[in-house]
Amino acid sequence: MAHDLFSEFKNILRDMGETDLLAEIACPQKLLIAGDHNGARALDVAYAPFDHVNLNADIVIVGLTPGRQQMRNALLEARRCLKSGFTDEAAKSAAKVFASFSGPMRTNLIAMLDSVGVNQALQLASTATLWGADADRVHFTSALRYPVFVENENYSGAPSILSTALLRKQLMQWFAAEMSALPNAVFVPLGPKVTEAVESAASHLGIGATRILAGLPHPSGANAERIAFFLGRKKREDVSAKVDTDRLLSCRASLEAKIRSWR
């Protein structure tokens, strides 16, 4: 398992005033990890405490990369914990949980996971308990563990992770190390860009496709129509032409088959 960066940044984080920390979040300088250019556009990777890995996880939810709001939440929570005398591990864990998926995105994700039988495979009444009583069975992470910014704006998938040297290095250094350290877990990538990155890391590590539950529509509110069709809440004839219903049905069938194979 690759080392994390918490020990390198914790003193800066603990000793920095809140005003200075908020300025850092707005435009990282002291928290910068790496940088490069893609054409004329600046790419920056900044530190935020997303280092904690739950090595007991049965299921791993994989997003793209933490955005600035998640970065802010995690840094402020870690700073609060350090000032309160928490151990490093406790501070990292608390910051990670505090900044995990929330709101409508979480609701949509739970509904889709339950609808294809993930809750039954894990012997849970609902995957909702992964955010509560069964939190010890889930690991939340990102293909790019630490926040990435393009021209100081949240990275949203362009340029491609796999065709950009800096981003591919981040993927293999951090996410692939997590994947290797979780030999019994299944991975749920959120969205096609994340799926591409996760499948590349899995191929590099020799991990089979049966452990990657690819094909869920991204759970963001902007994807409401695809989610509604995937969940059977909207009929084929009622969705707009932008929804590829055949692909969604194929993805659902593939997911259900994979889940039946490891129940």
Image (spheres, grey):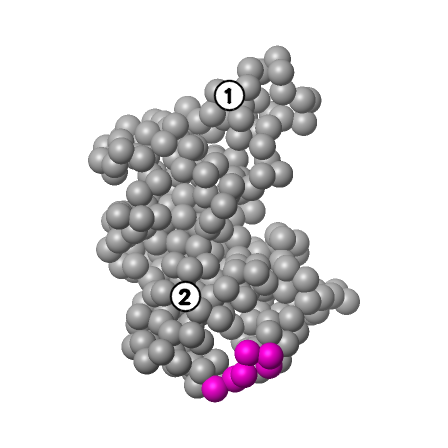
Neighbour tally class for label 1: few under 14, some 14-19, many 20 plus, Cα within 10 Å: few
> Is residue 212 toward the left or the right of residue 122 in the image?
right
Q: Label 1 belongs to which residue?
A: 233
From this viewpoint, which residue is outermost toward the front?
Answer: 84
Residue 209 locus on image (x, y percent): 37, 40
User: Is residue 176 among what the camera can see?
Assistant: no
Residue in front for this viewpoint, 113 or 245: 113
Query: In the image, what residue type sits under mark 2?
Result: Ala
Q: Label 2 belongs to which residue?
A: 95
Q: Residue at x 58, y 39 (%)?
A: 221
Q: Residue at x 31, y 72 (%)?
A: 89
> Is residue 140 toward the left or the right of residue 134 in the image?
right
Who comes first in sequence, dot 1 or dot 2?
2
Q: Residue at x 34, y 65 (%)?
A: 93
Q: In the rendered structure, are the residues bearing label 1 and label 2 in contact, judged by CB atoms less than 8 Å apart?
A: no
Q: Quick one: SS at disc 1?
A: loop
- Count of picture labels: 2
From this viewpoint, which residue is outermost toward the top?
Answer: 237
> Is residue 82 toward the left or the right of residue 15 in the image?
left
Query: In the image, what residue type sits under mark 1?
Result: Arg
The image shows residue 235, relative to residue 131, as above or below, that is: above
Q: Is residue 30 magenta?
A: no
Residue 256 locus on image (x, y percent): 36, 27
The image shows residue 178, relative to residue 187, as above or below, that is: below
- Per the rendered image, the range of residues in magenta is 15-20
